[in-house]
Every structure is written in structure tokens, then in C-alpha cells.
Image (tube, rainbow, N blue to C red):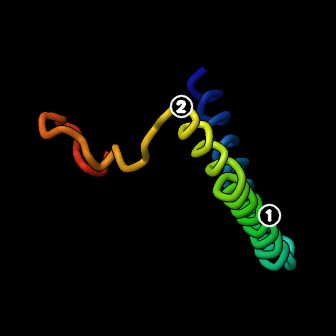
Amino acid sequence: MAAEDRQDEDLTRELLGLLREDRPEPPSSLPDRTIRKVQAELTARDLIDLTTFVFLVRFCAPLLDLVAAFFGHDPGAVYDRPSHDRRPDDE
């Protein structure tokens, strides 16, 4: 039985050795395609981020200021906090 186990192990080592030696070559155009794809994704992502930021700053922020002013919020009151307020200035 030990001889059969040794034969199985030897066969396994031989097969695994053959698999380790067999390294497939990547396609020659892979680096170029990868770079183009990453640039396209970054460009699309940057465009979406920029569009979202512009929409929020140009459209939503003034509307929120109008709603806050309607309810009597004074934007200068944020800087006139009482001294017993423990929040840090950048919070």
C-alpha cells in the first residue's frame, strides 16, 4: 500500500511540475488596452464627479441657503458661538 501511495505522489509531483512549467504568455496588446481602459474609466469618473460638484454648488447650495433664510437662519451666527461650546472650530 505504501508503494502505491509513493507512486501516486510521484505522479502528482510530475504533473504539478509540468503545470508549473507551462506559463501562458499574455497577449501582446494587453498593456496598451489596459492603459486605454484605465484612462477611459478615469475620464468618465472625473467627468461624473465634476458634473456632480458643479450641480451641487451652482444649483443645490443656493436653494438650501434660500430655504435656511426663509426659516430665519443667520449664516453669521455660526461664527458667534457661545464660549461654553466644546466643539472644535473645524467641526
Q: Secondary structure at mark 1?
A: helix
What residue did someone put label 1 on?
44
Q: Nearer the viewer, residue 37 or 56?
A: 56
Q: Confirm whether residue 22 shows in the render.
A: no
Q: Position of residue 30 (x, y in %)?
A: 82, 73
Q: Quadrant for the C terminus, please.
A: top left
Q: Is residue 68 above or below residue 32?
A: above
Secondary structure found at label 2: loop
In percent of width and height, residue 15 lies at 73, 48
- Most foreground residue, 75 or 25: 75
- Work out whether 80 lies above or below 53: above
Q: Amino acid at mark 1?
A: Ala
Residue 64 is situated, as x and y percent measured from the top left of the image, at 61, 42
Q: Which mark is residue 87?
A: none
* Residue 59, percent from left and from top: 72, 52
Q: Residues within 10 Å of mark 2 (few under 14, many from 20)?
A: few
**Residue drawn at the location 66% of the way across and 45% of the way down:** 63
Residue depth check, mark 2 versus mark 1: number of the one nearer the observer = 2
Tell me which residue sits at (70%, 42%) in the image. Answer: 11
Q: Quadrant of residue 65?
A: top right
Q: Quadrant of residue 26 in the image?
A: bottom right
3, 83: nearer the viewer: 83
User: Type of residue at label 2?
Assistant: Phe
Quadrant location, the N terminus: top right
Q: Which residue in the structure is indicated by mark 2?
A: 71
Query: In this picture, is 31 found above or below 3?
Result: below
